[in-house]
Every structure is written in C-alpha cells, then in structure tokens.
Image: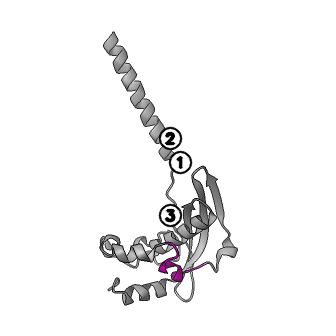
Amino acid sequence: MKKFFIAALLLSLTCDVCHAQRRQNSGVKEFEAECLGVEGDGSQTIRAYGFGKDKDDAVEQAQKNAVYAVIFKGITKGSGCNMKPLLTEVNAREKYEDYFDNFFKDDGPFEDFVSMADERMFGREDTRNALGRRYAVVVRVLRSELRMKLKEDGILK
C-alpha cells in the first residue's frame, strides 16, 4: 500500500509539472513577418513584430526582425513580396557570424535598409505583459540596396 501511495504521488507530481510547462508554453507565439506590398523601387513593405523592455527596444527589434526575414527566411506570409531570402546558402548566418553580429547590433548598419515611411498608414499594435512590450510595426525594407550591400561585402555571391 505504501509503494502504491508513493507511485501515485510521483505520477501526480509529474503530471502537474507537464501541465504547468504546457500552460507556460501556450502563451508563447511566434509572430512571422508579413508582406503588405512591394514598391516600384523593389522595396518590401512588411509588418514585423518585436519584443522589448520598452517601446523603443520593441520597435528596434521589429526592424531587425524584418531585415532578418528578408535576408535569411524570406517573406512567406501575405502576398506580393519576393518569398525567397536573399541568402539561400545553408548556414549562412553561422558562416558569416561576425559580419551579421555587427550588422544587427543596436543602432547597427541594418538601420540603413529600413524605412518607417509606411508607419502612419498602417499604425502599430502594442501588447504589454510583465516581461515587456510587443509591438507590430510596418516597415519598408530596401531589398535592392540590401542585396547590393551584401554583394559589396562579399557575403552574397
């Protein structure tokens, strides 16, 4: 009887831990960059999401996420954008790690390829929680200029 009680207690604790982890992870949602359109100069208007301790951090992270998506992931959500990433080389992020760490640092060169020109037209979405703020912003990523920069720096062949 004692062994049965211990086994039932262990099973109960295991189920409680699993349930708590499932509950905690269910609130985490990956927000993918979404294409809103392509301009005549080849730039892409994208809704991107960022998370930070305050508004400025979250907006900067959203800008980084938009540029990152254009370079490495491509824009698959929405319509009209070039779905293929600029870099299709396998493990390009890891291969050129020093370059991209510098490129995506705070106030880094990535900012030269992001415009907030469409921000007023679409507005921002703001969500707050105990950990910080999540913003959805509309940015224009200058894809053609970004492609030329990556070619000049020897990253894109």
CA–CA distance in space, label 2 to label 3: 22 Å
Callout 2 touching callout 1 (CB < 8 Å): yes
Q: Secondary structure at mark 1?
A: loop
In this rendering, does residue 84 appear at all? no
CA–CA distance in space, label 1 to label 3: 16 Å
The stretch in magenta equals: 106-115
Q: Which residue is mark 1?
A: 27
The residue most toward the top is 1
- Label 3 crowd bin: few (<14), some (14–19), many (20+), radius 10 Å: some
Q: Nearer the viewer, mark 1 or mark 3?
A: 1
Which quadrant is home to the C terminus?
bottom left
The image position of residue 49, as x and y in percent, is 55, 64
Q: Which residue is mark 2?
A: 23
Tell me which residue sits at (37%, 87%) in the image. 153
Specify the color scheme.
one colour
Is 151 placed above or below 31 here? below
Q: How many marks?
A: 3
| Amino acid at circle 3 | Glu
The image position of residue 31, as x and y in percent, is 52, 60
Q: Relative to the observer, which residue lies in front, 100 or 33?
A: 100
Which quadrant is home to the N terminus?
top left
Callout 1 touching callout 3 (CB < 8 Å): no
In this rendering, does residue 135 appear at all? yes
Q: Which residue is mark 3?
A: 32
**The stretch drawn in magenta includes residue 113:** yes
Q: Relative to the observer, which residue lies in front, 92 or 112?
A: 112
- Label 2 crowd bin: few (<14), some (14–19), many (20+), radius 10 Å: few
Label located before the other in sequence (2 or 3) = 2
Q: Relative to the observer, which residue lies in front, 115 or 58?
A: 58
| Amino acid at circle 1 | Gly
Residue 138, quarter of picture: bottom right
| Amino acid at circle 2 | Arg
